[in-house]
């Protein structure tokens, strides 16, 4: 904003919000931040209990609200070039896998239940399950892949390989390979819509 680098932007790094169980399974030897920080903080608690209730207005937000979705409906949102797209969580929860082109990019969105909200109950561990998402370029090694859900697994239709929520191939012809992640964010609609008013909203299959 001010200074020698004013106008420049730091690059985003793709990072999905997933459950500890899924992270640990995919990265069994990873390091975890310690709660022993030397500061007395209520780690694991939420000071804004009930914030994400869809029937309540956004707290401390006075801007215009895009009425195409409920203000606090969760969306998985992406920018591909100059095109923004949002995938509502209720649809993702129902469909679980979405193959959808955005601005010339073959996008696939995975949804997996089992990740709780950080903004529901006072203790996060007691919060409701809101699920996790992964967003990827569906092209790999020069081949366009399409995906579906089979036996509660993400499977590509071309090789039958199964994939996890992080876009990693687990079993099958492509085992050991990874899809290229697309920067995405799990946002409340009012927040995303305020900065991206021309967003395309995914309406569901068919």
Image: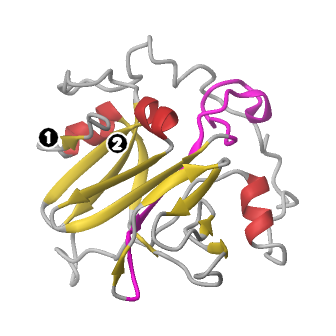
**Drawn side of residue 19 relative to residue 203, left or right:** right
Query: For residue 42, which numbered disc appears in the image?
Result: none
Q: Is residue 78 magenta?
A: no
Sequence-wise, the earlier of marks 1 and 2 is 2
Cα distance in 3D space between marks 1 and 2 = 15 Å
Q: Secondary structure at mark 2?
A: strand
Residue picked out by circle 2 = 87
> 125 or 144, which lies in front?
144
Per the rendered image, the range of residues in magenta is 114-141
Picture layout, residue 129 above or below residue 26: above
Q: Position of residue 146 (x, y in %)?
A: 40, 63
> In the current view of this chain or complex, which residue is farthest to the top?
55
Quarter holding the C terminus? top left
User: Nearer the viewer's eye, disc 1 or disc 2?
Assistant: 2
Classed neighbour count for the residue bearing mark 2: other residues with Cα under 10 Å, few (<14), some (14–19), many (≥20): many
| Residue closer to the observer: 60 or 119 | 119
Q: Main secondary structure of the magenta part?
A: loop
Which quarter of the figure is the N terminus placed in?
Answer: bottom left
Which residue carries the number 1 mark?
197
Q: Residues within 10 Å of mark 1 (few under 14, many from 20)?
A: few
Q: Residue at x 79, y 35 (%)?
A: 125
- Applied colour scheme: secondary structure
Residues tagged 1 and 2 counted as in contact (Cβ below 8 A): no
Residue 52 located left or right of residue 23: left
Q: Is residue 160 above or below residue 204?
A: below
Query: Residue 81 location in percent, x, y?
Result: 16, 67
Residue 67, x across and y down, in percent: 20, 21
Q: Is residue 117 in the magenta section? A: yes
Can you tell which quarter of the image residue 68 is in? Answer: top left
For the point 60% across and 82% down, the residue is 173
Residue found at x 45% / y 18%? 54
Mark 1 falls on what kind of element?
loop
């Amino acid at each position: 904003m001010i200074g020698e680098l004013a106008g420049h932007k730091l690059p985003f790094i793709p990072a999905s919000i997933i459950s500890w169980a899924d992270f640990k399974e995919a990265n069994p030897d990873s390091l975890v931040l310690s709660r022993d920080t030397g500061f007395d903080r209520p780690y694991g608690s939420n000071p804004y209990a009930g914030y994400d209730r869809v029937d309540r207005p956004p707290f401390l937000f006075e801007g215009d609200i895009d009425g195409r979705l409920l203000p606090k409906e969760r969306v998985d949102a992406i920018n591909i070039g100059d095109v923004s797209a949002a995938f509502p969580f209720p649809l993702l929860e129902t469909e679980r896998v979405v193959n959808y082109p955005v601005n010339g990019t073959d996008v696939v969105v995975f949804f997996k239940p089992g990740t709780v909200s950080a903004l529901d109950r006072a203790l996060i561990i007691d919060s409701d399950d809101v699920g996790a998402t992964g967003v990827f370029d569906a092209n790999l090694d020069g081949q366009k892949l399409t995906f579906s859900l089979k036996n509660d697994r993400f499977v590509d239709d071309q090789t039958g390989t199964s994939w996890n929520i992080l876009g990693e191939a687990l079993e099958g012809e492509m085992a050991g390979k990874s899809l290229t992640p697309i920067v995405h964010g799990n946002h409340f609609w009012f927040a995303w819509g305020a900065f991206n008013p021309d967003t395309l909203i995914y309406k569901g299959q068919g």
